[in-house]
Amino acid sequence: MTREEIELRAAQIPAEERPVPQSRLSGLGDFLGIYGGEHIAATEFVIGALLVTWGVRAKELLLGLVVGNLLATCMYAFCTAPIAVDTRLSLFAYLRKATGPWFQRAYNAAWGVTSIFYAAAMTAIASTSVKEVFGLPVQLEWYPTSAGSVVLTLALAAVTVFVAAYGFKGVARFSSICAPWMIVMFFCGAAVSLPALCSATGFGEVDGVGGLMRLIESHVFTGNVPEGQPHLTWIHVAAFAWMCNLAYHAGLNDMSIFRYAKRRCYGWVGIYGMFIGHFFAWTCAGIMGATAAALIGKDLTQLDSGAVAGTVLGWMGLLAVVAAGWTTATPNIYRAALSFATFAPKASLRKLSFAVGAVIAVCACFPAMMRIDKLVNAVVLVLPSVGAICLVEHWLFPRIGFVRYWNLYRGRKVNPAALAAWLVSAVFVAVALKCGWMHPFFLFLPTFLLAGAAYAVFAGLCGAGKPIPDAVRRDVDAVEARIAELAEQAVPPPARSASAPVRRLPVFGVLAAVMLALLALLSIVAPQSFKGASIACTALYFAFASVAAAFRRD
């Protein structure tokens, strides 16, 4: 292969499918912001209420959440982050090398559409939560019936699109500002709820940890289930917590995030999102939901996120739902733009983010977006099988004598072994769901293992273990090396300025932390006046945190 041919092939690879250069790697703070923000979502209020209706007692619930979230954290630490740091590629870029461009495009399209639907659902939930503030009617049809609701939804969507358009850094900075406040608001919600719940139920005073557990077991996680609903155990809770972000950790979609990590150990930052977002927030949301139901006098299943948060925390509760919707939708817009970059290699990621965001904004105006959970859940069970295929390709093949990226060396447009393994896992999911072989919460593990095992077998049959001719290996390696060089060359040199360097302003970060501490203290010592007092503290927090983020050094 001539130098010109190598240059031509390398230039055809979109910028977002090239390895991340060393100069663009990010520190731990960005990942804490993203995982704190994304995993404290508007749906946490719904899931917290859902856990109350499962009939799992408090101690069983806590055990299940610890086990499930620990397993999810380990997936981030031992699967997603290592392969991302090792390759510096997103999943979409890795699929080009491992499964071929045709398979890559099929997966990218499926995941891009899924991300659009999920981001639209988060935006729709956020807009629904504040509808009562503006006196907007409840949307009962699958299509929008209120012009005011459409305008509100488009306004909320514009924020997420604007942030996502600035790429990884924009998402990280936005999340790092919102995440600490949302964590504190969940704590405040539980703290404010407890005395109100005691009063509404006639429980009396809470005397220490033992009294708190008795209150939660008798009036929150009671072990009772609605008539006709199955009684779930701690094992179901553990499986649910493990699979909640399956597509991101086991499915490797968060390679798009961790490719910017300086070290593999950043994968342990998942513990922040899992145990703060999917343990602490779910538990607090369950307490808030039970309290809201007692105060309003309605069944918990009839309350949405806005009703729960607004009843307990007032305006700040509604803002928390909106912020949670924003910080969850924003990374999904970023992921969707990455997935569609394959189809528009000449378009910048910012333009793609605006285009994807426009579609999401329109979809979010349709109330039907909040009722696509069954479709999304089915897709989420199938898509992570690709993660198993990539993990087998990357870690297992070199250990059993197979050639990593064997399909790339053979020049095929599609990896037949990967396609067959993915179809096998998809058929297994469809048949298992249809026949009811097991609870859907347990289905992901055999599906994942089946896809990995099937790929190893099919790849062996297709010649993955056969040696690659030296000339072919040299040509392909030369193209990949040139792709990496182009990625480095695309990074602009640091701007030089005659002015003095910008000084850090840590005082604003300290003041922001003080405001959060004051919010937490108010919820404990003055729960009845929290709704009013929290407005000023919140406004000051966001002002201080925004200034601190603007002057933060990476």
Image: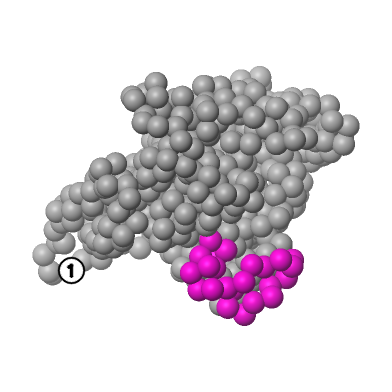
Residue 136 covered by magenta stretch? yes
Q: Which residue is mark 1?
A: 497
Would you say 270 lies left or right of 511 here?
right
Q: Quadrant of residue 206?
A: top left
Q: Nearer the viewer, residue 201 or 165?
A: 201
Would you say 519 lies left or right of 353 here?
left
Q: Residue at x 18, y 68 (%)?
A: 497
Q: Residue at x 60, y 23 (%)?
A: 234
How was this image coloured? one colour
Judge whether residue 300 can be spotted in this image: yes
Residue 279 covered by magenta stretch? no
Judge whether residue 94 can be spotted in this image: no
x, y percent for residue 390: 64, 35
Q: What amino acid is labelled 1 in the image?
A: Ser
Q: Residue furthest left?
A: 500
Q: Which residues are magenta?
A: 127-149
Q: Quadrant of residue 415?
A: top right
Label 1: few (<14), some or many (≥20) within 10 Å?
few
Q: Nearer the viewer, residue 166 or 36?
A: 36
Rendered view: 246 above or below 308: above
Q: Residue at x 53, y 41 (%)?
A: 290
Helix or strand or loop: what does disc 1 sit on?
A: loop
x, y percent for residue 416: 80, 40
x, y percent for residue 319: 42, 60
Q: Nearer the viewer, residue 534 or 42?
A: 534
Q: Residue furthest bottom?
A: 147
Q: Residue at x 57, y 63 (%)?
A: 128
Rendered view: 550 above or below 93: below
x, y percent for residue 441: 69, 32
